[in-house]
Image (cartoon, rainbow, N blue to C red):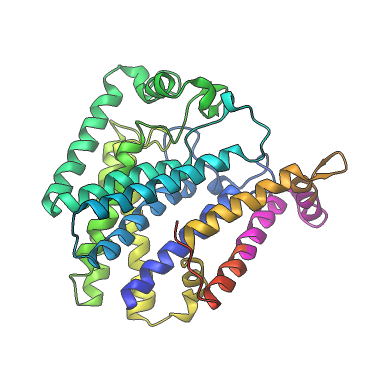
Amino acid sequence: MTRYLALDAFRGITIALMILVNTPGTWGHVYAPLLHADWHGATPTDLVFPFFLFIIGSAMFFSFKKSDFTANSEQFLKILKRGFIMFFIGFMLNVIPFDTPLEDLRIMGVLQRIGIAYVIAASLVLLLNRRGIFIFSGVILLAYWGLLVSVGEAGLTLEGNIIRQFDLAILGANHMYTMRDVSFDPEGLLSTIPAVVNMWLGFELTRYLTSIKEKKSSVIKLIIIGSLAIGLGALWHLVLPINKPLWTSSYVIYTTGFACLLLAIFIWLIDIKGHEKLVSPLLVYGTNPLFVYVLSFVFVTTYLIIPVGDSSLYRWLYEQYKLFAEPTLASFLFALSHVILFWFVSLKLYQHKIFIKI
């Protein structure tokens, strides 16, 4: 049971961080660690989404273990259904606040990427053994590296990368995110393929950990694996930059390394030191992760369509924090207050034993 709690704590801190980095009082005043890297490189914020994929892969292991990893038509239909629901909800979040013409709606997004990656990752873990998963992962990362550099030096730029060209051809510029006045989707179609590997690594590392009976050994091995992955990602960065928008292969390995280290910390705190109460708030946050993420998005986005004077409720609330804090701190406190708010929502759901699966 204890290892489940460590994974729940991991899931909980991931959701808390997603709300924190997605909900500043204003994007004009944000502490640097809470912003994404401009292009190449990674900040702490760039670790959050890969952590989410990692933990979904981990959850897949426990889910499929119940059915002894049986691959049948019923199982695949469930996978497709769940993937479609996540994609559809993500698309509907793009529709809010209902003021964008259909021809200009963005198609992709965070949940859409999760939905697509889930269908691919979940289907193949039922068809392949451990060796097959690792071989497939290696092939994807190396092939994706080759694809990125196949168009020359421009392949790693915002305007000239092949990921953007693919999305332009399939989705169209009007249905893509705009980054620095350029139509480029950081959650595009082609760049979702290497994100599948983040899920697979979460799945396989969970399978590996559950086979280790000695707790200290789990922590030591996670630290070793995590350190090696970070080192490999950093070395790979020299020839293939770590880049979240492109979701480069080096980024996959680098972020998985940090996921291992964070998981090692939670296993050490809960399993070895017995500090379950210390991380209990995170355990609460980890019980309805996808639902709380969606709810927080809808809740906060609604602020933008409620007028207050000449502005919106969102802006007005942020201005209240500025009455006693400088702009950047006020922006942070605005975000932190919503982390706390949605923790209480999670707590109420947990107390009433309501677990909403998406």
Q: Is residue 74 visible?
A: yes
Please report the residue visible at 78 percent of the width from the left and 48 percent of the height from the top: 313
Determine the residue positioned at 24% across, 70% down.
Answer: 218
Does residue 177 belong to the magenta stretch?
no
Q: Residue at the location (37% across, 49% down)?
A: 81
Specify the principal SS of the magenta part: helix
User: Hey, which quadrant is residue 357 in on the image?
Assistant: bottom left
Up-down: is 122 above or below 143? below
The quadrant of the rendering that contains the N terminus is bottom left
Residue sitting nearer the eye, 181 or 122: 122
Q: Is residue 285 above or below residue 316?
A: below
Position of residue 82 measured from the top left corner of the image (x, y, whole percent): 38, 51
Residue 187 drawn above or below residue 76: above
- Name the side, left or right, on which 312 lies relative to 339: right
Classify the position of the C terminus by image quarter: bottom left
Name the residue located 48 percent from the left edge and 43 percent from the top edge. Answer: 88
Task: Tell me which segment is drawn in magenta.
Answer: 317-341
Q: Position of residue 18 (x, y in %)?
A: 52, 53
Residue that extends furthest to the right in the rendered view of this protein = 309
**183 left or right of 239 in image:** right
Residue 28 locus on image (x, y percent): 68, 39
Is residue 227 in sight in this rendering? no
Say which quarter of the image contains residue 142. Answer: top left
Q: Which percent across, then down, holds residue 169?
A: 40, 18
In-image side of 159 versus 336 (left or right): left
Residue nearest the observer in this picture, 294 or 133:
294
